[in-house]
Amino acid sequence: MKNKFSIIKLDSLYSLFSKELSLNRIFGLDILRFFAITTVIISHGRFIFSEKVDRFFTYITFDGVTIFFVLSGFLIGGILIKQLENNTPRFSLLLDFWVKRWFRTLPAYFLILTILTICYTFTDPKFSFGTIKNYYFFCQNLYYPTPDYFTESWSLSVEEWFYLTVPFLIFILTIFFKLKPKISVLITALTILFFISFLRYMIYAEKDLQKALSFNHQVLFRLDSIMYGVIGAYFSYYYSKLWKSIPTILLISGIAIFLIQKWIFVSNMFPEPLLLYNVVFEYSLTSIATLLLLPFLSNFKKSKYKIGNLITIISLISYSMYLTHMALIKGIILKSIPWTDFTTNYNIILPVFYFLYWALTIIFSIIIYKFFEVPTTNLREKFVFSKKNQGPVMEIK
């Protein structure tokens, strides 16, 4: 009876997303997005448990945000390359790209940011609009630490600045310097990767402890992770035979790097934050590991099992899950509940708290996705500068 009830609930959920599930999606990328968001939410929710349980979570969580960065770069890079190769390069194409990107990401971000601003105003006597105004311009963490409000937004700031600056540089090289898109993308990618690596090396060389402890959440030092994804799109488009030649070997190599990094972290091999690995190589290796997964996953089209529908649904709502899970669900809604008024037994409080943390995150995200994200995303076709049909646009998130 219980199994039948669970099947009914899942079927109802699947029917709610029937349109999305019927699309010709790349299931391998859904898997990667599913893994990234679940490991982020597990990591951000583990604080409530004992040290022993928290230590267990250390073994099963990975750097989901960096995985998101590489995946976004891969999808965005593919869109940019196809636009430049299939059309006469002009700035109307760049405007179209920005409009489509912003209609996908900004409405939901500003919705949650505004809700949080209102909540902070009534719940935190120290809060003022001046402390959060920079969030509306994605300037909360350009080259300095994110303030103590909506701290998870640091990664959204990294992405938005990447999408604003890097495509602009590629279009400049293509339009004004008359370089082929293939050369423009490669030059921009190599320049960004070298520049960011150099900046991180300077932190190590100057022994700047304060910067070493905070650079990982700052725009200027994390743009390279997204660029690794663009490198993947570059090889996928221009060297497709090579891209598809040894996907399984690359997949195993990527997983091996992840496991080695996890062993390094768990064993505390590099305890000092100013060591070369921690400052210069750690996030690059995570990005490279994710990149190595993409040849296999980007050609994994469909799931043979019905559980794949659930993975796809979590993938679809992952952006809303990221926006809501920490500051709104955990930081405001759940913390405002007077738990000890009901019971002082923390063996009851903690599991209920954690269950609601996940349940509310998923419920809120489904509502936001279906009734806000999708409608606002659909508006983007009304604001197209280029008259030429660009063909279908890949979903970025």
Image: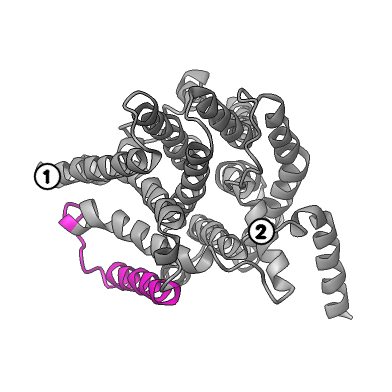
- Residues 158 and 298: in front is 298
Q: Is residue 94 left or right of residue 206?
A: right
Residue 249 lies within the magenta run: yes
Residue 134 lies within the magenta run: no
Q: Nearer the viewer, mark 1 or mark 2?
A: 2
Give the image location of residue 236, x and y in percent: 45, 57
Answer with mark 1 or mark 2, whichever residue precedes in sequence: 2
Q: Residue at x 20, y 40 (%)?
A: 199
Kind of residue sitting beneath label 1: Lys
Above/below status of 362 relative to 88: below
- Find the distance from the CA under tag 1 to the CA under tag 2: 46 Å
Magenta span: 247-276
Q: Residue at x 42, y 53 (%)?
A: 238
Q: Can residue 214 be seen at all in this image of the molecule?
A: no
- What mark, if any, has residue 25 been given in the picture? 2
Q: Is residue 364 left or right of residue 157?
A: right
For the N terminus, which image quadrant?
bottom right
Q: How is the image coloured?
A: one colour
Kind of residue sitting beneath label 2: Arg
Displayed quadrant of residue 176: top left
Give the image location of residue 250, x and y in percent: 39, 71
- What mark, if any, has residue 207 been given in the picture? 1
Query: For the residue carrying disc 2, how many other residues have a C-alpha within 10 Å: few (<14), some (14-19), or many (20+)?
Result: some
